[in-house]
Amino acid sequence: MTNLLEVSGISKSFGPVKVLKEISFDVRPGEVHALLGENGAGKSTLIKIVAGVINADEGEVRLDGKAVRFSSPREAAAHGIATVYQELLLFPDLSVAENIYLGHAPKTKWGTLDWNAMRAGARALLDSLDSPDLDVDTTVGKLSVANRQRVEIAKALSQDAKLVIMDEPTAALADADARRLMDVVKRLRDRGVGIIYVSHRLPEIFALADRVTVLRDGAYVGTKPIGEVTEGDLVSMMVGRAIDHLFPKVDTTPGETILEVKNLTYRNTVNDISLTVRAGEIVGIAGLIGSGRTELALTIFGITPATSGEILIDGKPVTISSPDDARRLKIAYVPEDRGSQGLIRPQTVRENVSLAILDRIARAFVVDRRKESALAKDAIERFGIRTRGPEQRVKQLSGGNQQKVVLAKWIATEPRVLIMDEPTRGIDVGAKAEIHALMSRLAGQGLAVLMISSELPEVLGMSDRVLVMRGGRIVAQFDRKDATPDAVGAAMTAAKAGASLESAPAGLRGAAAL
Amino acid sequence: MSVETPALSRLVPIRRWKSFFESYGQEFVILAALIVLFVGVGLYNPRFISTNNLTSMFVGNAYIAIAAIGMSMVIISGNIDVSVGSLIGVLGTISGTMAVSGYPIILCWLVPILIGMVINAGVGVLVAYVKIPSIVVTLGMLSILKGGLISVTGGAWISGMPPEFMIAQFRLFGLPSSVYFMVVLTVLAALWMKYSVFGRTIYAIGGNPEAARVSGIRIQPSIVGVFTIHGMFAGFAAVLFATQLQVIQSTVPPNLELTVITASVVGGVSILGGTGTVLGSTLAAILFAAIGSSLVFLNVSAYWLRAVQGLMILATVLADMARRRRI
């Protein structure tokens, strides 16, 4: 069979960070090719290159044997490549038919829109996707996520797509909707469309994919026909890298319980969470994006106050309804997105470090500049922040040093509980090891640390205990010695460790067998 | 491609002039422009730098600089107020009417300031707690104040205020009191913004409201506070405005709010919030006054002043955008 799409030797860097290293893979017509990897493995970048959103630094994309280089998604669409993104790109105030034909609507001989042809065409497309219940005249804003997805797919088909890229299409869907979507994907495949399918859900990949390619840290790990691998194999391929001195975890004997959370719930994103963190202990929370990890941190810290449940500090119940409350209770939160939640970018290192304790270093209502400067100098030294000095603006620092500034700001509040959300996202390996060393040292000084991370090696390397979240709940708990990549990875993706195809439900197996 | 590789050469102790210039760059540019203007136009026509001209320049424009102080604080906090011109018109009319009606002079000065604070505290509540964008609230306020003023007074002239009411015309050591007010208020506000917890909170909120909130800063009372202080400066400005001439026309000075906003922005206050100083806005207000006055001495139509202001605001915002994009 000739290949529909061939990608060879693709590399891409963002600034100094190499996010893709010589990736090669191919897609055949009538094939579902799954793309698998941890968050940050480079999947999204790779599909953006294929879809013409960004350009590769090196390497070649061939479509039907011809080398192509798209300068825009529109050009890629004209060549028959359509993308269904994770965040759906539809216009909520336009009708289903209008969305499907946006940009290539049929015209009458007068040059006006041919509404009849458009509505009939949209109807036919949706029927062919087994969605006769969808009205082509409703506005898209009124549809459920699952139905919007169908509209996106119909839109792809209306452009005669030969290759459809689907980026985690089922991430936001309930089980029944996900199954229906998978039926649609199979219909597409049976028509000879090639599909690149990005998903974290292993059972889904076994049910749908013909082949699977695994990426890790921007590098190509391997491509396998689905019949030749087990779920266990895939988990190992995704996360199985050696854990080394990147994680300088010091053994500690945990002390008293400082933070305790009982049946904590926030709407439907945090469900009935109970956990404890003791002094000197690092508790890691693993889970996929959307599993409720960050939402849990936001709730404990009072950014989205709990709708029910209890938070206890030193065994005493407390009320946390704003970050200000949390700060007063000596809880610190180093947020997931330091750009939007951690730093005041136009301000200096000094001004950022003192932000959370301004009222404490002020005499009457005037900030004590001597104390403030001393604090900043001390932070620069203690945290090894590489800067020209306290008066440098934080926007000029590298990502790792910015993260140290955020950490320094919170340590200045002398917290007893430190919540770190993705403490090393987007920073280079050297700075990562430094942040890890700091975390370990802080725990050694008796801080209770709750760490959230998408990087499994980080969770496994740094935590005394690992909690796994899925669907807003804690679904598994491991002690440090039992927390293997396979076991934790399987709990994250709802697969059984070492599960083989035989143990998958019969229906899924049948579908995967082609 | 790495812009910020921490090479050893960058670890040298901070070069103070550099950070100083980063903080006050715009202020220097305006100061330089002022000096060039005074020297250039002064050489062309020495009467431009005569005491008489300088005095009338300051007396006629100090209230704009004072209003721009409060405006700068509001813009630094990430908000804007397009109603300040109308507010000054209303407060000035109240002040003058009270003076003519024979109220104690001190009340004629203080009551407008208090009313300004109360009105703008209300604006602050709508912005911070009801979460209506400040441009919408103040657009509404602009119409209410302007329409209300003209309906009530019919735009009538107020005259016959007692001489001891005319505070803008008082002199000390030969200088009009407006100059003292402008300088003292600017310096106090500059120190307040730089060193007080409140000032620092305002910069943080304007720089990144989300990060400020996550850092435990209570944003809503701070926003109400900044609008209230802005109302106080509008009150000061209104009293000086009402007392600079022997008559007050009870309408809103045309385009006043735009002149005030322009002074803030040209003075280096980023329209996106978080950066700038009140020193810059006062210098910019003086610059506008000087440009306006110099046009007369250069025999150029005064209507060009608005066009020049417009060009300056565009140039400043473009420079601001370019600076932000570079980093």
Image: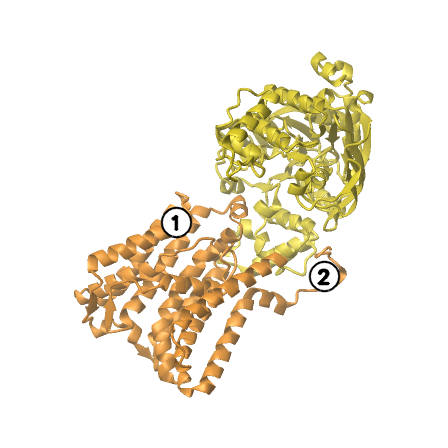
Chain colours: A yellow, B orange
For the residues labelled 1 and 2, the Cα–Cα distance comes to 47 Å
Q: Is residue B253 above or below residue A102?
A: below
User: Who's the residue at 39% across and 43% down the image?
Assistant: B130
Horizontal and vertical percent for residue A437? Answer: 73, 44
Q: Residues within 10 Å of mark 2 (few under 14, many from 20)?
A: few
Checking the image for residue B11, the label placed there is 2
Q: Amino acid at mark 1?
A: Val
Label disc, if present, on residue B136 of the rendered structure: 1
Drawn side of residue B89 relative to residue A266, left or right: left
Q: Are marks 1 and 2 on the same chain?
A: yes
In this rendered view, identify the residue nearer to me: A74 or A506: A74
Q: Is residue B300 above or below residue A475?
A: below
Residue A503 is left or right of residue B308, and the answer is right
Q: Could you tell me which chain the residue with mark 2 belongs to?
A: B
Q: Quadrant of residue B319?
A: bottom right
- Compared across the picture, whether A178 is left or right of B289 comes to right
Crowding near the residue tagged with mark 1, few <14, some 14–19, many ≥20 C-alpha atoms within 10 Å: some
Q: Secondary structure at mark 1?
A: helix
What is the residue that sits farthest to the left in this orientation? B101
Kind of residue at badge 2? Leu
Q: Nearer the viewer, residue B93 or A177?
A: A177
Residue at image coords 29%, 55%: B145
Residue A180: x %, y % from top left? 62, 20
**Comparing labels 1 and 2, the label whose residue is closer to the camera:** 1
- Residue B306 location in percent, x, y? 41, 68
Q: Position of residue B66 (x, y in %)?
A: 38, 66
